[in-house]
Image: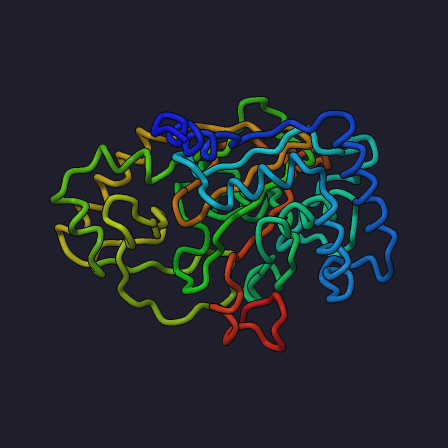
Amino acid sequence: MTVDSITNVKESLLDGSSIRLDADEQYIVASLAESLAHIPPALVDDAEWLARARASSCRLPTRVAQTIRRYRHDSGIDGMLEITNLPLDVSSLPPTPSCRDSVERDASEPAAVAIMIAQQLGEIVAYRDEKMGALVQNVVPVASLARSQSNGGSVPLKLHTENAFHPYRPDYVGLLCLRPAEESTVGTQIASVRNALPLLDERHTSVLHQARFVTTAPPSFRRAGDVEPHSVLGGAPDDPDIRVDFNATSGMDQDARAALHRLHQALTEASSELVLRPGDMVFLDNRLVVHGRSAFTPRYDGNDRWLHRVFVHLDTRRSRPARPANGPVLV
């Protein structure tokens, strides 16, 4: 194999950040989800049901599984995987929930789809103090939270690493769209540190790699541990991970605050917006990507924006001390 052909192979491994299911693939996924929806007790948080879903995930269409595996190996410069044309019967959806801490406990077909795809990427986890530890969570507007920096708000949601304060934050965040917002331009804002890093100078990146920042828990958490200093960038200097919440992270000194401000500018400059349609699912590499949301105006009439959200860990052994009975919920 020549040097050029090796280079082409490496480049091809980083392609495929999106896949649109064809009719045959859509039928396979729909059949698997329908079967899971009828397996007793038909609860996504039940250990036996999850085991059956894990087995079913191995029967996903080959092209879908290959794309997920490629993304798991390297999530690419944008840190994002988009899967579109997933089976979703919009006409059968109930009204969009509008209550605080809304979750999906029943093994509905959309929830089964989200679980199966996530299980091909890693293991689903949740947090006891966020949405009662449910594995499939509803991201919906809630009137009492309208102006909050939370998944129930409708004001602009600032760029953030999901659960940036937590030592066992998700490796990936998955969002499946069931119903879009009335405004067709309401999007998920996404920014990868891989795109932003070239915009930063060494003076700022040096500070960002030091434990000179603190992050508080988001409003969705009922309780949180002590706030300890941490770095915003970590790992390889030329390809770092990121840990920041621009609503909850603060610098502990003037230089740290200046570096954080410059990082926000760079990420904003490098950001893009993704508008999800029904049947679209996006995964974000939470180690590389921060995300937010543009503002929108909910009507609270049962037709508002509705996403299913799931969290994925690659290495559940790392979080074993926080997961009683080796279950999926962290305490």
Horizontal arrangement in the rendering, residue 76 relative to residue 137 (left or right): left
Q: Quadrant of residue 26?
A: top right
> In terms of depth relative to the viewer, which is nearer, 60 or 302?
60
269 to 143, vertically: above or below:
above
Q: What kind of colouring is applied to the model shown? A: rainbow
> In terms of depth relative to the viewer, which is nearer, 122 or 283?
122
* Residue 138 at x, y percent in the picture: 64, 48
Q: Residue at x 43, y 35 (%)?
A: 190
The quarter of the image holding the C terminus is bottom right
Horizontal arrangement in the rendering, residue 38 relative to residue 144 (left or right): right
Q: Residue at x 76, y 39 (%)?
A: 29
40 to 254, vertically: above or below:
below
The quarter of the image holding the N terminus is top left
> In terms of depth relative to the viewer, which is nearer, 27 or 167?
27
As drawn, the residue found furthest toward the top would be: 184
Q: Residue at x 72, y 42 (%)?
A: 60
* Residue 315 at x, y percent in the picture: 50, 62
Q: Quadrant of residue 41?
A: bottom right
> In terms of depth relative to the viewer, which is nearer, 43 or 313?
313
How many discs appear? 0
* Residue 235 at x, y percent in the picture: 29, 54
Q: Residue at x 76, y 34 (%)?
A: 88
Horizontal arrangement in the rendering, residue 207 relative to residue 220 (left or right): left
* Residue 129 at x, y percent in the picture: 55, 66
208 to 46, vertically: above or below:
above
100 to 132, vertically: above or below:
above
